[in-house]
Structures are given as structure tokens and as C-alpha cells.
Image (spheres, rainbow, N blue to C red):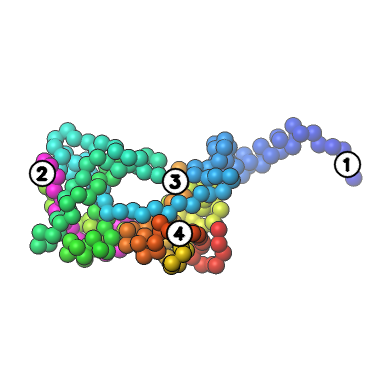
């Protein structure tokens, strides 16, 4: 048997050849992130749980109708997910029998379809039976009237209660052993209560940072502000990360 030593340059070349033969895969993605994946701290995903208060998404056309010809959304505050923001603009959301929410924040950028996302308490206040849907799944949903300083828009559909979900990138997904479209479980513990949320939809893409979105009712139910421990795990096992 030949026990001769393989020099470092030969090893590096063998590794490069193996990576190329495998199409690059995750190793190539790691190389693109010289420090760490988006949102990671000390070599691990940094889990963030955020309360997504009522808000709406608008099309370019509806922005002009509501705020005036030539108007575009103006960013006021960047959201945790890169490229998304809370706009300076707000709208009034009007339901049946003139029930209304006077100042609902618009989030940007604009979308192909306008959509209003509410908590259950909001939908009760408006008198709208808003179904739980994942964002963008607005077929067969109720509508409302949006009122801005320059005009109003009658939405025939688009009012939903946003289903809880977790944004994550490919590295997060590998860490938790999940893929886009899977369901996870979120456990939030605090000094006065503990709540487990099932059916947390995984929304994975290359650039997202690890963040769970729950609505205001859910945030109040688990007393999120007083949380002492937050655990995210696959929906099909009891493993905790």
C-alpha cells in the first residue's frame, strides 16, 4: 500500500472537482456568503418572531387612484425582510354597514393584486367574515372599500386573515430539515402562559431571514412581549432547535 503524503494543493483540487461534479450545491451557496447566511449569528439561525399588524398591499393602479395620479409608495420604515417596507401611506378600510378601520398601513413594494390582511378581531370589527389564507391566495375571499385622500377603490376580493408562516432562507431550511411548503410548530413560553402554534407554513427562498409572522390576536394570546423562550420545530417531530 502506498502511504505517500498528498499535498494540500492536490486535496484542494480534488475538493473543487467533487463540487463541480455535484453541480456546486450548498457549497457554492456558502461560498457566496463570505461571513454567514442572511440573519445568522455565531453560526446559527437567529430566530425572530414578529407580530404582523393589520395592513394592506396595493397594485400600482390602486396607489394612483387612492393617492393621486403619478403617486408611488414612499418608504417610511424598512421591514426585517430586505426589500420590504412600511410605507408612509395609510388607507381607510370600510366594511359592511359603514364599519371602518380609519388608518391601515400600506406595505411595499406594490403587488399584482391588492390585498388586506387582518386579525380576527379586526374582521369582526369590520363585519367581514375573512377566511384564513396564505398571502396571495385570495380566490373566493370577501372584498371591502379602500378610501384614500384622492379616491376610493372597491375590492371585490382580497380581505384575509393571514395564516401564520415562517420566512427562511435555504440554509435555515437545511438546518431545520424542512423545505418550502412544509409545516412547522412554534412554541412560545412566558412567565404567565405557554402557547404552541401548529401549521406554521414554511416560505423558503434564497435571500429571506428567519422570521415567524403571527397576527396581533396570536401575539396577545401568547404574551409575546414577555416571552422567555421561543422554539421552532418541524411539524412531524418533537425535535427542538
Q: Quadrant of residue 84?
A: top left
> What crowding class fits label 2: few (fewer than 14 Cα within 10 Å), some (14-19), or many (20 or more)?
some
Residue at 43% x, 67% y is 193
**In the rendered structure, which disc, 4 or 1, sits on the residue that comes first in sequence?**
1
Which quarter of the picture shows residue 138? Answer: bottom left
Disc 2 is placed on an element classified as loop
Q: Which residues are magenta?
A: 131-151
Which label sits on residue 151? 2
Q: Which mark is residue 3?
A: 1
Q: Nearer the viewer, mark 2 or mark 4?
A: 4
How far across and how far down the image is residue 148, in percent?
Answer: 14, 45
Q: CA distance from mark 4 to mark 1?
A: 58 Å
Q: Which numbered circle lies on residue 208?
A: 3
User: Do callouts 2 and 4 mark residues in contact (Cβ within 8 Å)?
Assistant: no
Task: Residue 180 in the image: state x and y as whole percent.
Answer: 45, 55
Main SS, magenta region, reads: loop
Disc sitting over residue 227 in the figure: 4
Mark 1, Cα crowd under 10 Å, few <14 / some 14-19 / many 20+, is: few
In front of the other: 126 or 83:
126
Residue 175, compared with residue 96, is above or below; it is: above
Q: Nearer the viewer, mark 1 or mark 3?
A: 3
Residue 139 seen in render: no
Q: Nearer the viewer, residue 199 or 49?
A: 49
The quarter of the picture where the C terminus appears is bottom right
Q: Nearer the viewer, mark 4 or mark 3?
A: 4
User: Residue 76: image x %, image y %?
Assistant: 29, 38
Q: Is 139 colored magenta in this rendering?
A: yes
Amino acid at each position: 500500500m502506498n502511504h505517500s503524503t498528498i499535498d494540500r494543493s492536490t486535496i484542494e483540487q480534488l475538493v473543487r472537482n467533487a463540487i463541480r461534479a455535484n453541480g456546486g450545491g450548498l457549497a457554492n451557496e456558502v461560498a457566496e456568503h463570505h461571513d454567514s447566511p442572511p440573519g445568522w449569528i455565531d453560526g446559527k439561525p437567529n430566530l425572530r418572531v414578529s407580530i404582523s399588524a393589520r395592513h394592506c398591499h396595493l397594485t400600482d393602479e390602486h396607489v394612483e387612484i387612492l393617492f393621486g395620479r403619478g403617486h408611488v409608495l414612499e418608504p417610511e420604515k424598512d421591514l426585517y425582510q430586505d426589500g420590504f417596507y412600511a410605507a408612509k401611506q395609510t388607507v381607510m378600510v370600510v366594511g359592511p354597514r359603514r364599519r371602518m378601520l380609519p388608518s391601515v398601513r400600506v406595505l411595499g413594494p406594490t403587488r399584482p393584486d391588492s390585498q388586506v390582511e387582518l386579525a380576527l378581531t379586526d374582521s369582526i370589527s369590520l363585519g367581514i367574515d375573512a377566511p384564513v389564507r396564505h398571502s396571495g391566495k385570495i380566490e373566493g375571499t370577501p372584498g371591502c372599500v379602500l378610501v384614500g385622500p384622492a379616491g376610493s377603490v372597491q375590492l371585490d376580493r382580497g380581505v384575509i386573515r393571514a395564516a401564520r408562516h415562517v420566512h427562511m432562507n435555504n440554509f435555515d431550511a437545511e438546518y431545520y430539515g424542512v423545505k418550502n411548503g412544509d409545516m412547522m410548530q412554534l412554541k412560545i413560553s412566558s412567565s404567565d402562559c405557554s402557547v404552541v402554534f401548529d401549521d406554521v407554513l414554511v416560505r423558503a427562498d434564497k435571500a429571506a431571514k428567519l422570521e415567524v409572522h403571527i397576527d396581533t390576536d396570536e401575539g396577545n394570546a401568547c404574551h409575546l412581549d414577555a416571552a422567555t423562550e421561543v422554539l421552532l420545530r418541524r411539524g412531524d417531530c418533537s425535535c427542538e432547535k
